[in-house]
Image: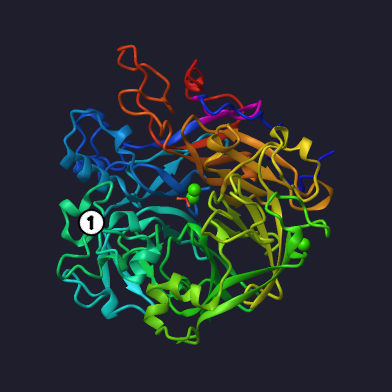
């Protein structure tokens, strides 16, 4: 008997799905509905989606591309009938978005408008119904590259943020490559600016440029052609690149609010950030830097949380201390040989230290000013000797236990020539399938030391991969590879969405539940599988309502407009031309029971 606590989201796990299957597969007894798709209107005057005649203006009034982070909050007083959906739009796949006839300038302009974020109200008649979009919602809002953001924290007003467009160094237009995120305890959204470096051209010769991967090559999207600020070689725009790579806080409840980039959390490829209020009352934010051999960071607010004082709480991420993690293994180094074999003490585990970068407003890094710590955070973390991890993706505290979970998605360069070797927290050479770290702070979340253990070392035991599932029998778990986003249900089970499984274990990416407590700790069960070419993002688990949501990103990514690999989510030949509709990144709701909108025919391409 499996012990799932009080979770009402019971299911029989699905079998893994071959990577070429173009379908969203859910467990027996469940169905799914798209809530919103790329190109769907957000306002009463939004133009209908017309993929062969797109414009920046139409895209700016429609849901953007590649939804990643997702949250849905219920509107107070609506009896659960109205919700506020927030999603970010990480990047664009121009090869899938446009027919050959679309010119390059239009592709750039539409692509720019398809980046950013969306807040939109959703409604349902009954709690058991799927949500649908209300274009008349008073909080509906699109954030594009033309939206203004303000900076706060120690770097606000710094010369390192000053540009021709903003000589004061206090604001910027746009947010880029927003990946994961988090809901704060005060109801705002955090979103991480991840691979911002790919949007900038620079001389590429400085230590910082090299460390952040900014080069003199033309960028893939070519925005520097239209806006000189994307080329740091242009006079007056030298510091524009410093305005990206931050954690953004958005208040979706106030559509007039100016979103904030918090400089106190440092600048790097933020996967996202999630906040927990420690027993001491401080807000603690965890954030991973998603690149090979990068670090895990923690921010501890200077001020403390005040229940009910939302305006005060919205300032908590402005000032505080910044740390980076050093992990130490407790097994003899010789036992960590790169094969993934479990060491003799039965676990990949040990202790760790939060190394200070910035404390009480003062730099703790020799040779670095406060400004340099925050704008060149990777260099500061190098200097203090942080532990190089296998691509830290989402990091989230478990709201039930307070322990912290970090997905290390993969690292094909671990222990290869010229790169760092294996260690106990990153125990496999050429780590194809990734692992999940569990962190137990020694004290509350403001502690400066912690214990850690790997909950999962991912892979497919049936294919002979060296895996570890906290001691749970490997022949009884769903195969899992490349953990990316983590979430929790109401009773503290861990849910993991994946990105990259097709090229590893050969199955489509999916969503998995992992038991953390009791004799079933380490049991992995697959809940759904996304279509060919897609990654699974933004999982939101509402087990008390027997429902879950995923953001399906880049369905059919390896195809093209001419030769589609996926037709998700519509799977209908609406105009009768013998071809299904094009793939569209979408937010999907999974529900118990039968489909209610006559969508049974579009659940999977036959
Ligand atoms: Fe955008 Fe780290 O995934
Ligand atoms: Ca050990
Ligand atoms: Ca991600
Ligand atoms: Ca990823």
Q: Toward the viewer: 309 or 205? A: 205
Specify the color scheme: rainbow
Membership of 241 in magenta stretch: no
Residue at x 64%, y 44% (from the top left corner) = 543
Image quadrant holding the N terminus, namely top right
Number of numbered discs overlaid on the protein picture: 1
Secondary structure state at the residue bearing disc 1: loop
Would residue 247 appear left or right of 255 to someone viewing this image?
Answer: right
Residue at disc 1, CB closer than 8 Å to ligand 1: no
Q: Position of residue 72 (x, y in %)?
A: 49, 49
Q: Residue furthest front?
A: 417
Q: Toward the viewer: 103 or 487? A: 103
Would residue 151 appear left or right of 12 to someone viewing this image?
Answer: left
Residue 252 falls in image quadrant: bottom left
The residue under label 1 is 146
Residue at x 71%, y 53% (from the top left corner) = 455
Q: Position of residue 134 (x, y in %)?
A: 37, 41
Position of 482 relative to 30 (above/below): below
Q: Toward the viewer: 80 or 567? A: 567
Residue at x 43%, y 60% (from the top left corner) = 269
Would residue 432 appear left or right of 517 to someone viewing this image?
Answer: left
Residue 337 falls in image quadrant: bottom right
Asked whether the viewer can see residue 304, the reply is no
**Label 1 Cα crowd, 10 Å radius (few <14 / some 14-19 / many 20+):** some
Residue at x 36%, y 75% (from the top left corner) = 152
What is the magenta range? 22-32
Membership of 24 in magenta stretch: yes
Q: Main secondary structure of the magenta part?
A: loop
């Amino acid at each position: 008997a499996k012990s799932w606590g009080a979770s009402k989201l019971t299911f029989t796990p699905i079998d893994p799905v071959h990577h070429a299957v173009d379908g969203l597969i859910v467990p027996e007894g469940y169905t799914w509905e798209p809530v919103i798709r790329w190109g769907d209107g957000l306002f009463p005057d939004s133009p209908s989606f017309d993929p062969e005649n797109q414009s920046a203006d139409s895209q700016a009034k429609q849901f953007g591309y590649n939804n990643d982070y997702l949250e849905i909050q219920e509107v107070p007083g609506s009896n659960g009938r109205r919700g506020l959906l927030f999603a970010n739009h990480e990047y664009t796949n121009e090869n899938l978005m446009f027919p050959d006839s679309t010119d390059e300038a239009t592709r750039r302009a539409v692509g720019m408008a398809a980046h950013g974020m969306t807040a939109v109200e959703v409604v349902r008649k009954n709690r058991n119904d799927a949500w649908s979009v209300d274009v008349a919602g008073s909080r509906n809002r699109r954030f594009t590259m033309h939206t203004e953001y303000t900076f706060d924290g120690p770097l606000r007003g710094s010369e390192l943020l000053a540009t021709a467009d903003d000589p004061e160094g206090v604001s910027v237009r746009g947010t880029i490559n927003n990946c994961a995120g988090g809901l704060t305890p005060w109801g705002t959204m955090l979103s991480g600016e991840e691979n911002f470096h790919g949007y900038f051209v620079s001389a590429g010769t400085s230590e910082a440029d090299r460390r952040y991967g900014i080069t003199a090559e033309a960028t893939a999207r070519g925005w520097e052609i239209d806006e000189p600020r994307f080329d740091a070689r242009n006079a007056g725009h030298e510091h524009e690149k410093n305005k990206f790579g931050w954690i953004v806080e958005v208040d979706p409840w106030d559509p007039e609010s100016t979103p904030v980039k918090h400089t106190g959390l440092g600048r790097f490829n933020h996967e996202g950030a999630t906040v927990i209020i420690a027993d001491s009352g401080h807000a603690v934010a965890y954030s991973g830097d998603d690149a090979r051999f990068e670090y895990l960071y923690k921010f501890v607010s200077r001020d403390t949380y005040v229940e009910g004082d939302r305006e005060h709480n919205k300032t908590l991420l402005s000032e505080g201390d910044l740390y980076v993690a050093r992990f130490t293994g407790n097994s003899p180094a010789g036992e960590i040989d790169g094969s993934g074999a479990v060491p003799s003490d039965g676990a990949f585990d040990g202790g760790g230290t939060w190394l200070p970068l910035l404390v009480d407003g003062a730099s703790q890094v020799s040779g670095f000013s406060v400004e340099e710590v925050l704008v060149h955070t990777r260099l500061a973390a190098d200097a203090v000797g942080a532990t190089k991890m296998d691509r830290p993706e989402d990091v989230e505290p478990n709201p039930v236990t307070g322990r912290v979970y970090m997905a290390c998605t993969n690292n094909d360069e671990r222990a290869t020539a010229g790169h760092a070797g294996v260690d106990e927290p990153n125990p496999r050479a050429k780590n194809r399938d990734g692992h999940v770290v569990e962190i137990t702070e020694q004290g509350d979340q403001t502690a400066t030391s912690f214990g850690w253990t790997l909950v999962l070392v991912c892979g497919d035991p049936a294919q002979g991969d060296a895996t570890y599932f906290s001691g749970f029998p490997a022949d009884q778990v769903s195969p899992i590879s490349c953990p990316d986003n983590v979430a929790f249900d109401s009773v503290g089970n861990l849910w993991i969405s994946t990105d990259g499984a097709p090229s590893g274990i050969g199955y489509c990416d999916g969503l998995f539940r992992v038991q953390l407590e009791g004799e079933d700790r380490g049991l992995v069960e697959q809940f759904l599988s996304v279509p060919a070419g897609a990654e699974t993002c933004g999982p939101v688990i509402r087990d008390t309502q027997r429902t879950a949501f995923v953001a399906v990103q880049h369905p059919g990514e390896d195809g093209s407009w001419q030769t589609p690999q996926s037709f998700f989510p519509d799977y209908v030949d609406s105009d009768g031309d013998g071809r299904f509709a094009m793939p569209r990144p979408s937010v999907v709701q999974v529900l118990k029971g039968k489909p209610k909108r006559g969508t049974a025919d579009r659940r999977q391409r036959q």
